[in-house]
Amino acid sequence: MKRVMVIGGPGSGKSTLARRLHAITELPLFHLDQFYWRPGWRKTPREEWERIVTGLTARDEWIMDGGYDSSFHVRMPRADTIIWLDLPRRIAFPRVLKRIAMGFGRVRQDAAPGCPEWLDWEFLRWAWTFQRAHDARYRQALVEYASHANVYMFTGSRGADRFLETLSC
């Protein structure tokens, strides 16, 4: 395990799992939100984003957390391990709300500078519909780009916790 993607929807625990995996493996950790967003929650232009992701994936070792299915064609062929946190909305969405409430006005450690937590109705709508809207896209990308990789899919936190325990032994 040298190049690990941690994917999933908002509130699925991607960043938390990535940090825990980093602590166990000591692989370099990249939170893609820190590279995609610019101050004020402005998106990085597409061509620049692809250059950034290509540069990160060219490294020999990494952990990357973030959905960003628009970059699966770059990341998945390089990943040797893909961890998909596919938590149901009843678990993930309350986590999103809690994250906003607890961190309102502050920048999370895995977020880009100048991007504090705030109440964004468009984001909440996206988070609410994420699983239904992205499930088929994620599955297709795994078939298309990741047949070589070890893929782990977890629908709850316990499975991911057990997976990490096997690594720390």
Image (spheres, rainbow, N blue to C red):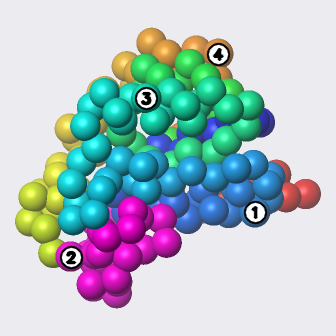
Residue 3 horizontal/vertical position (percent): 68, 35
Amino acid type at mark 4: His
Which mark is nearer the camera, 2 or 3?
3
Above/below status of 74 relative to 55: above
Above/below status of 2 relative to 22: above
- Note whether residue 8 is visible: no
Q: Which residue does the image show at 49% across and 72% down from the upper left? A: 109
Quick one: label 3, few (<14), some, or many (20+) residues within 10 Å?
few
Distance from label 3 to label 1 (Cα)? 27 Å
Which mark is nearer the camera, 4 or 1?
1
- Label number found at residue 148: 4
Q: Which residue does the image show at 42% across and 74% down from the upper left? A: 108
- Helix, strand or loop for disc 1: helix
Task: Point out the tag, 4 or 2, that comes first from the N-terminus.
Answer: 2
Occupied quadrant, residue 63: top right
- Label number found at residue 51: 3
Residue on which disc 2 sits: 118
Magenta range is: 91-118
Amino acid type at mark 2: Trp
Left or right of 155? Residue 96 is left
Task: Point out the tag, 4 or 1, that comes first from the N-terminus.
Answer: 1
**Viewer-proximal residue, 103 or 142?**
103
Dots 2, 1 in contact, CB < 8 A: no
Occupied quadrant, residue 95: bottom left
Amino acid type at mark 3: Arg
- Label number found at residue 23: 1
- Note whether residue 107 is visible: yes
